[in-house]
Image (cartoon, rainbow, N blue to C red):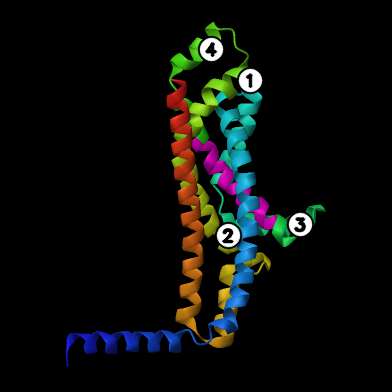
Amino acid sequence: MNRVAIVSALIAFLVGLSAATFSELRIFLPAILKGAVVTAQVSVLSIILFLFMSLIAGIGRSRGNTAIRWISTIYIEVFRGTSLLVILFWMFFVMPEFGLTLSPMVAGVAAIGLNFGAYGAEVVRGALGAVPKGQTEATVALNMSAYRRMTRIVLPQAIAIMIPGMSNLTIELIKATALVSAVTLVDITYAAVQQNQLHYRTIEIFLITVMLYYCLAQFVRFGGEALEEYFTHHLNKRV
């Protein structure tokens, strides 16, 4: 048997194996894709809250007055030192005891955004501290207001420094959205578990689940690299 025949036989075998393995794909894939939509919704909303809280708490802890520093520090230490799953349970199961009932989506977004915002605040604080002090001293000498000093000089340089760390946290945030299944949200992970219990196609179902999470993570990674390149190029032009 020549090489062409061997290769042809191997390709035919792999095609047949793939067809047999993924023959029931149309049965469970729509449910997993619906879960992917929920994961995307939770991720986007959580990322917005995470970035907002990171900036507010990071700037507050490093540049605010005494009261703001204390408030920022308490927020960071409480949410950074507490399990995300416990925070999620508090938001969904405990808050109604105080008269505040949150939907599963709101509870999931609030828990994830606030938890990761505490970690992001330290990234922001470190980035602000990495900006050369001479830059700030020059703005003081030019009699710039604190707002203009922060928005035009310090923050643009800090953003370029903080992007890699914030990108990593964003990827971790997307993976952490799997915990929202604990408060009845049918995300990718929960949908995959349900479909596996119904169809017992473990390899195909969880392979697709892994691929979906990987694609979301790569989207964030490439976006972070593009932002870092943009800010670095922009700052170099200004210099």
> To which residue does mark 4 refer?
139
* x and y, in percent, of residue 175 in the image: 52, 59
Residue found farthest to the left: 2
Mark sitting on residue 147: 1
Q: Amino acid at mark 3?
A: Leu
| Mark 3 vs mark 4, CA separation in Å | 45 Å
- Secondary structure beneath dot 4 equals helix
Q: Which residue is drawn at the image coordinates 61% and 17% (left, top)? A: 146
Residue corresponding to mark 2? 177
Identify the mark at residue 236; answer none if there is no mark: none
Above/below status of 37 relative to 142: below
Instruction: Give the residue drawn at x 67%, y 65%.
Output: 183
| Secondary structure of the residue carrying numbered label 3 | loop
Q: Which residues are magenta?
A: 107-123
* Mark 4 closeness class: few <14, some 14–19, many ≥20 residues within 10 Å: some
Tag 2: amino acid: Thr
Question: Image quadrant of residue 155?
Answer: top right
Neighbor class of circle 2 (other Cα within 10 Å; few <14, some 14-19, many 20+) is: many
Foreground residue, 68 or 132?
Answer: 132
Residue type at mark 4 is Thr
Front residue of 195/62: it is: 195
Q: Which residue is mark 3?
A: 102
Q: Which comes sooner in the sequence, label 3 or label 2?
A: 3
CA distance separating discs 3 and 1: 35 Å
Q: CA distance from mark 3 to mark 2?
A: 17 Å
